[in-house]
Image: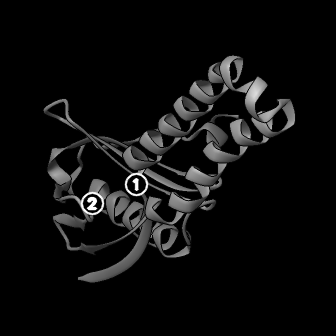
C-alpha cells in the first residue's frame, strides 16, 4: 500500500472562470459603443481588457485543489475534493498518462465511463501527481503481467511521434 498527496487542477472551475472572463470581455467590448463618450476610448479599452484579466487572476488560486491516492494490489482509491473514485484494475479497459505542462491521467473503464485528473503546471505543483502517475503506471503494468489482462496503455501524444 502506497499513499500519495498531490495537487490537481479543477478543470471544470477553470473552464467556468475562463468562460466568465470572456463573457465579461465581450460585454464590456460591446458596451463601449455607449460608454466611449462618457469615459473615452483609452479608459474604455483599459476597462474592457483589465476587468476580465482581474477576474481571472483574482480567482486563479481557486483552480488548484488538493487530492490524494492510495495504491493497493487490486485497486486504487483516488480522493479528490469533489468526489472519491475507487479504480479497480480489473475494470480498466485503457489508460493514458501524459507528461506535458504537468501531468494528466485518463482512465477508460469497461462499462464505458471515463475518469480524468489533470495537474497543470500553470496552476499547481504537479510534481507529486507525476510521481503518483509513474507509480500507478508501474503497478498497472505489473498487474497486466501478473493477471494476463487485456488492459492497455494508450500512448500519449509524445509517445506516438
Q: Which residue is mark 2?
A: 143
Q: Residues within 10 Å of mark 2 (few under 14, many from 20)?
A: some
Of the 4 image quadrants, the one containing the C terminus is top right
Q: Nearer the viewer, mark 1 or mark 2?
A: 1
Pick the residue in front: 18 or 53. Answer: 53
Q: Earlier in the sequence, mark 1 or mark 2?
A: 1
Q: Residue at x 48, y 37 (%)?
A: 20
Q: Position of residue 139 (x, y in %)?
A: 34, 66
The count of marks equals: 2
**Left or right: where 56 falls relative to 69:** right
Q: Which residue is mark 1?
A: 10
Residue found at the far right of this picture:
42
Q: Residue at x 52, y 29 (%)?
A: 23
**Left or right: where 111 falls relative to 148:** left
Decide: is 33 above or below 7.
above
Q: Residue at x 20, y 73 (%)?
A: 72
Q: Position of residue 106 (x, y in %)?
A: 38, 45
Decide: is 138 above or below 70.
above
- Tell me the element at label 1: loop
**Left or right: where 128 falls relative to 29:** left
Rendered image: mark on residue 131: none
Of the 4 image quadrants, the one containing the N terminus is bottom left
What is the quadrant of residue 108 in the picture?
Answer: top left
- Tell me the element at label 2: helix
Amino acid at each position: 500500500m502506497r499513499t500519495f498527496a498531490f495537487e490537481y487542477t479543477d478543470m471544470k472551475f477553470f473552464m467556468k472562470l475562463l468562460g466568465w472572463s470572456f463573457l465579461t470581455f465581450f460585454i464590456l467590448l460591446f458596451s463601449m459603443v455607449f460608454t466611449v463618450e462618457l469615459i473615452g476610448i483609452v479608459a474604455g479599452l483599459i476597462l474592457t481588457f483589465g476587468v476580465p484579466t482581474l477576474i481571472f487572476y483574482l480567482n486563479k488560486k481557486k483552480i488548484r485543489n488538493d487530492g490524494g491516492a492510495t495504491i493497493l494490489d487490486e485497486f486504487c482509491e483516488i480522493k479528490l475534493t469533489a468526489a472519491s473514485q475507487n479504480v479497480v484494475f480489473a475494470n480498466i479497459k485503457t489508460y493514458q498518462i501524459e507528461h506535458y505542462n504537468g501531468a494528466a491521467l485518463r482512465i477508460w473503464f469497461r462499462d464505458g465511463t471515463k475518469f480524468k485528473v489533470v495537474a497543470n503546471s500553470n496552476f499547481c505543483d504537479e510534481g507529486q501527481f507525476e510521481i503518483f502517475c509513474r507509480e500507478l503506471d508501474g503497478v498497472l503494468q505489473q498487474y497486466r503481467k501478473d493477471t494476463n489482462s487485456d488492459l492497455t496503455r494508450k500512448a500519449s501524444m509524445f509517445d506516438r511521434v
